[in-house]
Amino acid sequence: MSGTVVSTTGWKPNSRAARRRRADHLATAFGMVMAGILVLVLASILWTLLSRGLAGLSATAIMKPMGPPGSSSGLANAIVGSLIQTFMALLMATPLGLGCGIYLSEYGTETNKFASCVRFVSDVLMSVPSILVGLFVYQVLVAPFGHFSALAGSVALAILAVPIIVRTTEDMLRLVPTSMREAGAALGATRWRVTLSLCLRSAKTGVLTGILLALARVSGETAPLLFTSLGNQNWSFSLNRPMASLPVTIYQYAGASYEDWVQLAWAGALLVTMGVLAINIAVRVSARRG
Amino acid sequence: MTLATATQPEEARDKAGVSHSGSRRSGPDTVFHLLVAASALLVLVVLGGLVVLMGLGGSQAFRTFGLGFAFHDVWNPVADVYGAWAPLFGTIVSTLIGVAIALPLAFGTAFWLTAMAPPRVAAIVGTAVQLLAAVPSIIFGMWGFFTIVPFMARTVQPFLTHHFRHVPGIRFIIHGAPFGTGLMTAGLVLAVMIAPFMTAVMRDVFAAMPNMLRESAYGLGATRWDVMWKVVVPWSRSGMIGAIVLGMGRALGETMAVTFVIGNVTAVGWSLFAPRSTVASLIALQFPESPAGSLRLSALLALGFILMLLSFASLALARMLRGDTK
């Protein structure tokens, strides 16, 4: 693209072709910079987390429960609380999401108005701001009973997980060839048998992927837990009482003015992010292999 | 669930898409159908309940302040006077800034990944971008608060104030003490949060274009950018708008990340660098201190209802535009 070459054969330095090629190079550079910025942001986030969180990530932080500033406290009850609540949420969301996904793919034909309505609503639920889900569950499960509870937190997380499971289940079941269903029916299997033992089994990996992605999404959620499971300074295993969770603890500690609390917040943030990213990478690796 | 009763031959026809209403079915099958239909219904009920409860909870505020609630710019818990305009303004402006920054980020990345990057590099960068989408929002908030906010306070704002203090027009936008928090910071954080989602949608849309068109353009001597700008973009315009609206919907309801970096002051003004608040951040901060049955709680729920409508509208718009391409 040397523009200074003196032309002798009618080739002009500023010809249309040269200009178009220059635009092409410019666009390439632009795209590269934009992609580079996004990669840099990820790197910056990971670097911030590692440099600030690694120092606080000790045996105490993982083994001991939360406590007043100054004492050697940790995040153990928040970690366990997060595990309990996400597990409960998946326990509720998986059957519901599977059922809804099965309904949409097996019974929700083009002409089924109810099914297309449910499909739309599931999409809406997927994009509902998570804090509104928290407000909703507060009104249904917290306000009437007069106290915050881990159960309410789990329900809020479940509501966020369901649409993801519905979407992947439906998509994966639709990939199962009709001939397989016909073969099942020809062998005399009832419809529920065909659906569960043939279709769902052959779509197993995809459906599992959806559940794992829902797990990854839900385990980092903070906003829906603020008004439902509230958080707890002490050990609590009762679903009927407020329960600590890692994201809410991070939120409370990050804004605190105590050095060791902020330190714990970063350690917790590192733990959550690593967990979420590990699930995502695992899903991607297994998807590539399967 | 062990009894497997005789199957009717219409089972197979059922699956082929023929309406199955009225066909004879065995007992367990009916139970199964009812079961899955019930779970579908439950999903419907949850969203219905969400909308209805939000509206009911906010009705007290709507009754007290009328429709002017949405456009009244005072939010004063002490005097018990509430208007939604300050947080709504914050939500709308921060979302617009976020989308405006995310659009070139997402478009550039999607273009480079689909047309330019060597496959192996594209795979790695693509994975990194997808991982960025998976980072929890509270992490974006902490990162923004400890990285972007100091940067804005120490570098960007003093620079802007120094050079543009006397420029009419711009003066009002950069006005304010260098706190580092505000609409601009929130918009930046939102942009890097929603850009991965928009990139993913745009990549899908670009990849969905028939290769024939692409090859014909190359055959005519077009450069890769020519193909992108004159063939791919016009072909996938509605899909791209769908991606933008999708990103917008995410930015509208984002809570944790914004709460960390917006400064949380319920005021309205043109400065992009002064602390503001958004609907979601205001709910997150003030809900815990609002007693049940109070007007304040009702006003917060009314805000939630308006946010619900906004996010609903953006999704409906995205769906409508995406429907055009198919």
Image (spheres, coloured by chain):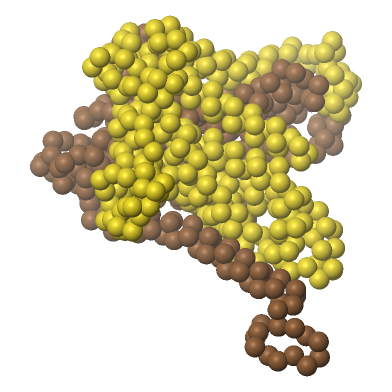
Chain colours: A brown, B yellow
Write the residue at 43% across / 31% down: B89
Residue B313, x across and y down, in percent: 59, 27
The answer, for residue B85, to whether it is visible in the render is yes
**Left or right placement of residue A87 versus residue A182 in this view:** left
Q: Quadrant of residue A180?
A: top right
Write the residue at 25% across / 35% down: A252
Q: Is residue A191 above or below residue A69?
A: above
Out of A81 and A156, give the one closest to the viewer.
A156
The answer, for residue A90, to whether it is visible in the render is no
Q: Is residue A139 above or below residue A172?
A: above
Write the residue at 75% across / 62% down: B227
Residue A64, x across and y down, in percent: 20, 40
**Left or right placement of residue B309 versus residue B300 in this view:** right
**Left or right placement of residue A135 versus residue A189 in this view:** left
Toward the left, the furthest residue is: A70
Residue B31, x across and y down, in percent: 69, 13
Write the residue at 78% across / 39% down: B326
Out of B277 and A263, give the one closest to the viewer.
B277
Residue A251, x across and y down, in percent: 29, 37
